[in-house]
Image (tube, grey):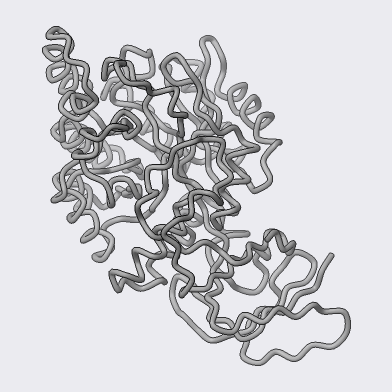
Amino acid sequence: MKNILFKNGTVVNHNNITKSDVLISNKKIIQIDENIKVEGQFEVIDCNGMLVFPGMIDAHTHMGIPIKDGWSADDFESGSKSALNGGVTAIVDFTVLEKDQSLVESINERNKLAEKSVIDVALHCNITRFDKNILAEIPEIIKMGYNSFKVFTTYEEANMMLTYNQIEEVSKIIYDNGGLLMVHSEDNNVIKKASEPLIAKKLIHPKYHAIARPPEAEVVAIEKMAEISERTGCKTYIVHLNTAKGLNIAKDCANMYVETCPQYLLLDDSVYEREDGAMFVASPPLRKQEDCAALWQGIENGWVDVLATDHCPFMLADKQKGIPFQNIPNGIGGVETLFPVMLNQFIERGISLSRLVQLICANPARIFDLNDNYGELTIGKKANLVIVDPNKIESDWTGKLRSKTDWNAFSEFPAIFPEKVIISGEVIN
């Protein structure tokens, strides 16, 4: 195993930025200090002018899952390779609970698929069926080391939805056993009321996807989840929050974590009018510029806890023109561009890079019990590092992507890709 000294870099942690050397040996960080001297078999990599980050975590991915009549384009092999190319050295994916399957069986099946990954994979456990056997499994699964459980307040048509009363019962069990509830927060009744007239009129354009799932759907669901969280005491994590009003509610809830995604910071619903507008269809939909601005304010104010991608990419052929909006496969890719695009955005906007590390590394490590190896560059952690030249800003970078997909939502945004990614002490590129 290589022993490597990274010299003269600027180390970016969640709580400080320092000019330091980093020494790694046997897959671990063994020293961080100014001007480290070494003897013996050590490779020296000069990082002068470079930023040295911890390996990033994408806490919300969907590798190779069934959506509508197709599958997301990246499996664990291609998705993890693309993640690594962008500086992500760990992902947290989701189980898929099949009919009559137990939660433990869904975990085992997903872990088997994840064996193809070239980076670390943790799992959230989806609860898309409510019965006494499912509820009885939750305490044991938490003892197994899986602390996060996701429920849906919509997708009734796909048999994935739990009612608010059912979610409250799940919350109580999760709270009693020290776990975390994750919620896809879009109210099903609001969506039905908005979408049914559009479908009846046979309106098919992608722009109706956003109209059919209005901002009120998120607001109503988050209001109800805040009430449930207050009654049960259960820590509740709102995935892909995307409205100003939703954020305003969530930030005042003591037990609530907020996740948002690059697409909700950088894109608005005007893109549905583009020739490739169907490719931007994801749930929840893209919103207005004022919502994007509110989320950026939330990042600066500390109201947003995690930045993740909801990585679920599709090929151009999967979203051909003429598909009715309600039948377009939902999902946008992003695991490979999460760090490169957002790094440039934070630099352009003058936001501390320590805040970026909080959002894509330290906070997800803390929230999802990955602290043993992730969260910061410090002695004893796994030697996962990302070396970046902050001056190497690229505008035409799609050719270097390793995802299987042939389309990227963020291609118009400048990006700063890593010069080197080190995972478990091995230099990858």
Residue 23 screen position, x and y as percent: 71, 78
- Vertical side of 133 occupied by 171: above or below: below
- Vertical side of 182 occupied by 393: above or below: below
Residue 33 vs residue 427, the one in the foreground: 427
Q: Which residue is located at x 33 percent, y 42 percent?
A: 240
Residue 272 screen position, x and y as percent: 23, 33
Quadrant into which the N terminus falls = bottom right
Residue 120 screen position, x and y as percent: 64, 48
Q: Which residue is located at x 24 percent, y 42 percent?
A: 230
Residue 341 vs residue 294, the one in the foreground: 341
Q: Which residue is located at x 41 percent, y 16 percent?
A: 68
> Left or right: where does residue 86 sit relative to residue 215?
right
Residue 411 vs residue 23, the one in the foreground: 411
**Residue 46 seen in the current view:** yes
**Residue 162 seen in the current view:** no
> Left or right: where does residue 145 sit relative to residue 409?
right
Residue 370 vs residue 261, the one in the foreground: 261
Q: Which residue is located at x 69 percent, y 29 percent?
A: 112
